[in-house]
Image (cartoon, coloured by chain):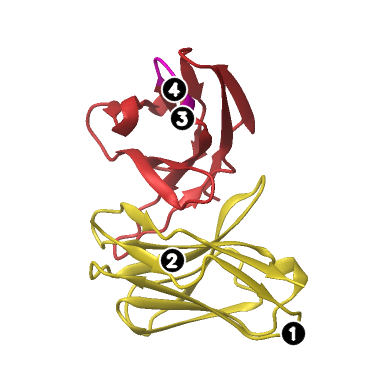
Chain colours: A yellow, B red
Amino acid sequence: DVKVTQSSRYLVKRTGEKVFLECVQDMDHENMFWYRQDPGLGLRLIYFSYDVKMKEKGDIPEGYSVSREKKERFSLILESASTNQTSMYLCASIHGTTTEAFFGQGTRLTVV
Amino acid sequence: AQSVTQPDIHITVSEGASLELRCNYSYGATPYLFWYVQSPGQGLQLLLKYFSGDTLVQGIKGFEAEFKRSQSSFNLRKPSVHWSDAAEYFCAVAPFSGGYNKLIFGAGTRLAVHP
């Protein structure tokens, strides 16, 4: 089975801190995604990557950046965390042609 | 712009009753269509998907969905709901972009099941 692992289930950070959310997949998928999930809004795409060192903005990239130095790892970075970034963050990976997405368990981030 | 609408935010059904969760999409061509389920504290799990062919697709856990092009809909159904089906359900579309895909999600429908 494909496994997508997010480094933390729960994080509490202070306003202004730099925050790293890590995601690793073990199936050599080309495409990886970061979503944030908020009640009533579903999942909104922050950034995605279709290859190493490649990245594309999603629908809500402001306040975030990403890094993909290796195929299996996709990191989401909050340069200066703010309280409105308190949310559930979900990482997903997709094989290039199958379109089926596999999700990590999510990281619930609280910024205080 | 591409969008997915799930009109029902919350649905409550009795155990053993039938279920239908609605999903409408807005897209110029027929996209790839998906239903995902999220149990509390978990990531998303794929229930079923539609790419082409037979418009009635079967998924896991006894779920099925029907694609209706004329209505731009992809409703999820289950003939008899179990208490373990209580979860949040997301409809998603993937407008294939050739080199890579991205999923666009609806806002979700939270299902509660009464004993």
Q: Secondary structure at mark 3?
A: helix
**Does residue B110 appear in the picture of this structure?**
yes
Do the residues bearing badges 2 and 1 touch, measured as CB atoms within 8 Å? no
- Above or below, A24 relative to A59: below
| Mark whose residue sits in front, 3 or 1 | 3
Q: Secondary structure at mark 2?
A: strand
Pointer 3: what residue? B85
Secondary structure of the residue carrying tag 4 is loop
Mark pair 2, 1: CA separation: 24 Å
Which mark, residue B1? none
Q: Are marks 4 and 3 in contact (CB under 8 Å)?
A: yes
Name the mark nearer the viewer: 4 or 2.
4
What's the amino acid at mark 1? Gly
Instruction: Using the numbered discs, state the Cα–Cα distance from disc 4 to disc 2 in whole angstroms.
Output: 32 Å
Question: Which amino acid type is shown beneath numbered disc 3?
Answer: Asp
Q: Label 4: chain?
A: B
Q: Which amino acid does the dot numbered 4 rest on?
A: His
Labelled disc at residue A33:
2
Residue at horizontal 31%, vertical 51%?
A: A100
| Magenta span of residues | B78-85
Q: Position of residue B46 (x, y in %)?
A: 36, 44
Tell me the chain of label 1.
Answer: A
In front of the other: label 2 or label 3?
3
Judging depth in this view, the residue of B16 and A81 nearest the camera is B16
User: Where residue B82 is drawn, which disc sits there?
Assistant: 4
Please report contact status of discs 3 and 1: CB closer than 8 Å, yes or no: no
Q: Residue furthest front?
A: B115
| Mark 2 → mark 3, Cα distance in angstroms | 27 Å
Where's residue B16, x and y in %? 45, 13
Left or right relative to B51: residue B79: right
Q: Which residue is mark 1?
A: A16
